[in-house]
Amino acid sequence: MTENKTEETAVQQYDNYPDPDAIVHFDDASEELVKLIAETLETSEFLSTSRDDLPETTLLVEEVENE
């Protein structure tokens, strides 16, 4: 059985970051679209996004507790 190399590479790439609930890759989307989606997700009381100086159009999404 062979492992999915793309998945393995993604896991290794994000080993140094906090454990997000989701990692969203936008591939060739514009930076403006990524910012718009990040801002939209941030309007939720239950989600937080971060970019953590990632070199590509990627968002890390975490669930937060509503206090």
Image (spheres, grey):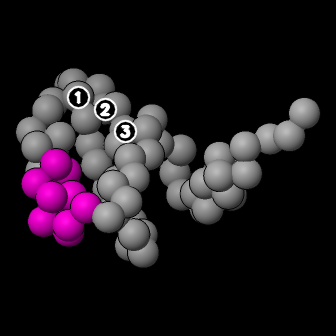
Amino acid residing under circle 1: Phe
Main SS category, magenta section: helix
- Distance Cα–Cα, label 1 vs label 2: 5 Å
- Circle 3 packing at 10 Å, graded few (<14), some (14-19), many (20+), is some
Range drawn in magenta: 29-38
Q: In which quarter of the image is the N terminus?
A: top right
Q: Nearer the viewer, residue 4 or 19?
A: 4
Left or right of 41: which side holds 59? right
Task: Identify the residue under disc 3.
Answer: 62
- Circle 1 packing at 10 Å, graded few (<14), some (14-19), many (20+), is few
x and y percent of residue 48 in the render? 27, 43
Q: Which of 10 and 65 is in front in this view?
A: 10
Q: Please tell me which residue is depicted at 14% across the width and 32% down the height of the picture.
A: 44
- Quarter of image, res 28: bottom left
Q: Work out which residue is located at the far right of the displayed protein and give it.
A: 1
Task: Identify the residue under disc 2.
Answer: 64
Q: Work out which residue is located at the far top of the displayed protein and give it.
A: 66
x and y percent of residue 17 in the render? 54, 58
Q: What element carries label 1?
A: loop
